[in-house]
Amino acid sequence: MEEVTPRSNEHWKRAYLGPLPDEFLRVTTAQDIQEVSDRQAALALQSYHNTYTPHMAPNFVGRLSITIAQAKLVKNYGITRMDPYVRLRVGHFVYETQTAPNGGRNPRWNRVIHCQLPAGVETIALEIYDECNFSMDELIAWAEIRIPQSVLRGETHEDWYPLSGKQGEGLEGSIDMVMSFNNMVVQPRMIQTNAPVVLVPNVATGTPMPVFVAPNQPQAARLPPPVLSDDDLTRIHEMFPQVDKEVIKSVAVANNQDRDAVINALLQMSS
């Protein structure tokens, strides 16, 4: 029988008992951390706009509704069928659809996105990614779509827009989108905030785009924002060991240092 030495006994103490987490075999890289941070910024922005739509800034001209219905892609780049999702940029604001599991070359989302249209913005930047489990999500296709003038006049417009990618300009397939616009602008109210700025990379152009992360709640009084202590950050990191501590700090800033909101956001990111 093999003798149990103090060293081997120490290895046994380090053994992990119970179900393994989903991220057990995943190697976390700097790109993965940036992707998680970008996605959390997009979620925070979308939550803010869904909650505080009446408080429009003076540079918004109305509300743009975009339905991302489906896409027809010319090639499957995954080993198995791809799991595509869409990332949409309107001005400085970023939105994402849900993932279409096993969507392959014909993913369907039927996702409606309501966003405020900033003055001077005439195009929408669109990117389609394949969600990957053990590597960074792969960019499949992209497009820059000009908002039709008929939409700005109040008409509903549906069209298939060509996609670019590895196959060439406009040769990666097409995406079905429906757009409508409401130019009713609610009287704006001033909201003062020290919201952080996150640089989200535009993979198609390589140019980073600033995304302003709004707080979850408007500040009613000029009180110093609460700050999670080092002990709080350590406890949260123990709950989510697969998430880098710097990412947790970024999520805390995006969620106004609210401990429960940070935990809920990390749970959504891990699901």
Image (tube, helix red, strand yellow):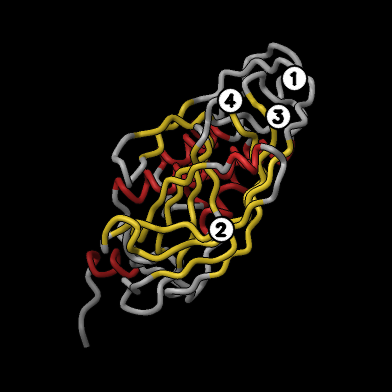
On residue 132, the disc is none
Foreground disc of the pair 4, 1: 4
Looking at the image, is mark 3 or mark 4 earlier in the sequence?
A: 4
Q: Quadrant of residue 186?
A: top right
User: Pointer 4: residues within 10 angstroms few (<14), some, or many (20+)?
Assistant: few
CA gap, disc 3 and disc 2:
37 Å
Do we see residue 13 in this rendering? Answer: no
Q: Is residue 107 above or below residue 269?
A: below
CA gap, disc 4 and disc 1:
14 Å
Foreground disc of the pair 3, 4: 4
Q: Which residue is mark 1?
A: 188
Residue 103, given in percent of the width and then of the height, sits at 48, 74
Q: Which residue is mark 2?
A: 159
Q: Which amino acid is tagged 1?
A: Pro
Q: Which residue is mark 3?
A: 217
Looking at the image, is mark 4 or mark 2 earlier in the sequence?
A: 4
Residue 236, given in percent of the width and then of the height, sits at 53, 45
Mark 1 and mark 2 residues within 8 Å of each other at the beta carbon: no
Q: Which amino acid is tagged 2?
A: Asp
On residue 119, the disc is 4
CA gap, disc 1 and disc 2:
33 Å
Q: Label 2, secondary structure: give it.
A: strand
